[in-house]
Amino acid sequence: MLDSVGERTLAAPASDDASVPLWQPALLAAMAGGMGWGIRGQYGHETGAMIAGLLVSLALVFLFCPQAAMLPAARAVAMATIAMGFGGSMTYGQTIGLTQDAPLIGHWEALRWGLLGLAIKGAIWIGFAGLFLGMGLGAVRYRVREILLMMLALLGFYAIGVWLLNQPFDPANKILPRIYFSDDWRWEPGASLKPRRECWGGLLLALLGVWAWVSGIRRDRLARNLALWGMIGGGLGFPLGQSVQAFHAWNPEVFKSGLWLRLDPLMNWWNWMETTFGAVMGACLGVGLWLNRRRIALAENRSSRGNEAHSTFADSRFDATIPPTIECLLVALHVSLLVLAEFTSVPGANALYDLGLLLGLIPMIAVTGGRWWPFLLVLPITMVPIAGKTIRQLVYREHSIGIVPGWLLYGVLPLALTTFVAIWFARRSSRGLSAGEFARRALLICTWLYFGLNFAFFQFPWPWAAWTSRTPNGLAFAFCALALTVAVICISRNRARSGVRIPWR
């Protein structure tokens, strides 16, 4: 099939989305995003945000691509997961402070400015995830050289955007950018402030640059539309989530009577802000993909067409253009740099991987051209920093478990399991296992692994034990994990009864 600019495209399996009602992607993606972004609150930055990107994209691939080929679907999930980390480079703590810090309570102009800043930063953050999810699921085939050039161009746009919108920055002389969403003497003239360097302008220009390329030159309509839906989700989700926390800060009298008198001391309002943000952005991505479901264009699983040989262009998405040896070297390089940046003070590694776009450079290229990388990224590579931070917190900071059992329980076992499953998936990527079955299994594994690690990070806030400020969020995450599990099982059973062809080997 040829599109309007002569690009060869892939036809979507006609029955894949026929029975998906709107409430399913909206609700499942909201629960996946709410739990994932809430868990991110404990782990932070780029690698923490990848949890939400992983869970939301797995849920959507499960719903919309039951008969699709597994490898291109895994690439789409991996690309969205990587892209969700790009926005983690932005500072936003002081932007939130404009809406709730004690000296600014009652300052409506500061509140509006802070919420505007959160809307812009949220739109940029989730816009990247929507765009790259669309690139993975859409009709246009992106190759390694294109992705490499695109990522280098993103870095160039980022540098220009920072120069244009986030400079000058000289807090010692009280010189800040004209458009600035962190601590500013504009709001507190006589205060002693420590303004943060912002980079949202660089990421905004990078997002607009790649959006213009995929929509105007490559004519990738799904990527174009999902980027816009991601921007809507982030632009609504971040300020809506913070509005909950700001309402609590601005109206303390509301929480001093009735049920709130007992609940308020136990509420981690910051984590509820994050959970709300994740739920809204996940729901928007789900609705956006549902509205654009006819543009999903993954190759159909080859096993569903019998044993006959096919040499169609659709099968090219099974191709791996990076040799396995190079894939292994890239895994070793990326994981080494990731561990050094997250857990050591090595200057070069910290500087190199401090920016989300640089952090995603190797993975995005390797996922695009590799056979093993998509599955390794989805499972063990995303798990590495989360397992490491859990060990650091529980073993070395809180001393709540011994070194040997802590490393085994929170590091060795999760990484061994995810590595084994990733290899198992990769070996079956050309043997008939469908994208729907891959997403179903991966979603259940990742949901419970990340929930379990976070539950341990929360010091196991069982509802029958004495409640702490972590108990309400722990219960919310448990509800999301259980609801996702039940929904996935029920939808899978309904598909089996309705005759949707999903290979099980």
Image (tube, grey):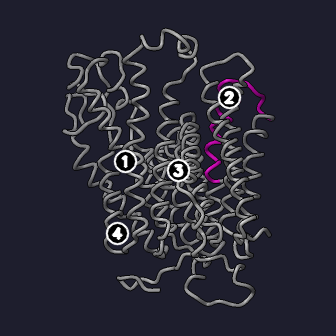
Q: Say which residue label 1 marks.
A: 123
Amino acid carrying mark 4 in the image:
Ser
Q: Which numbered disc, 2 or 4, marks the residue that appears first in the sequence?
A: 4
Q: Which numbered disc, 1 or 2, marks the residue that appears first in the sequence?
A: 1
Quick one: label 2, few (<14), some, or many (20+) residues within 10 Å? some
- Depth check, front residue: 315 or 46: 315
Marks 1/3: CA–CA distance: 18 Å
- Depth check, front residue: 307 or 423: 307
Q: Which numbered disc, 3 or 2, marks the residue that appears first in the sequence?
A: 3
Instruction: Please name the predominant secondary structure of the magenta segment in the image.
Output: helix
- From the top left corner, tell me how far across and down residue 35 is, in percent: 59, 40
At x 75% / y 71%, what residue is drawn? 503
Q: Say which residue label 3 marks.
A: 26
Element assignment for label 2 = helix
Marks 2/4: CA–CA distance: 48 Å
Q: Point out the stretch of residues depicted in magenta.
A: 381-404
Q: Given contact means CB atoms under 8 Å apart, are the residues at marks 3 and 2 in contact?
A: no
Q: Say which residue label 4 marks.
A: 215
**Quarter of the image that includes the C terminus:** bottom right
Element assignment for label 4 = helix
Between marks 3 and 2 in the image, the one whose residue lies nearer the viewer:
3
The image shows residue 103, relative to residue 228, as above or below, that is above
Q: Say which residue label 2 marks.
A: 396
Quick one: label 4, few (<14), some, or many (20+) residues within 10 Å? some
At x 62% / y 57%, what residue is drawn? 378
Between marks 1 and 2 in the image, the one whose residue lies nearer the viewer:
1
The reply to whether residue 326 is visible in this rendering is no
Amino acid carrying mark 1 in the image:
Ala
Marks 1/2: CA–CA distance: 36 Å
- From the top left corner, tell me how far across and down residue 117 is, in percent: 31, 38
Amino acid carrying mark 2 in the image:
Tyr
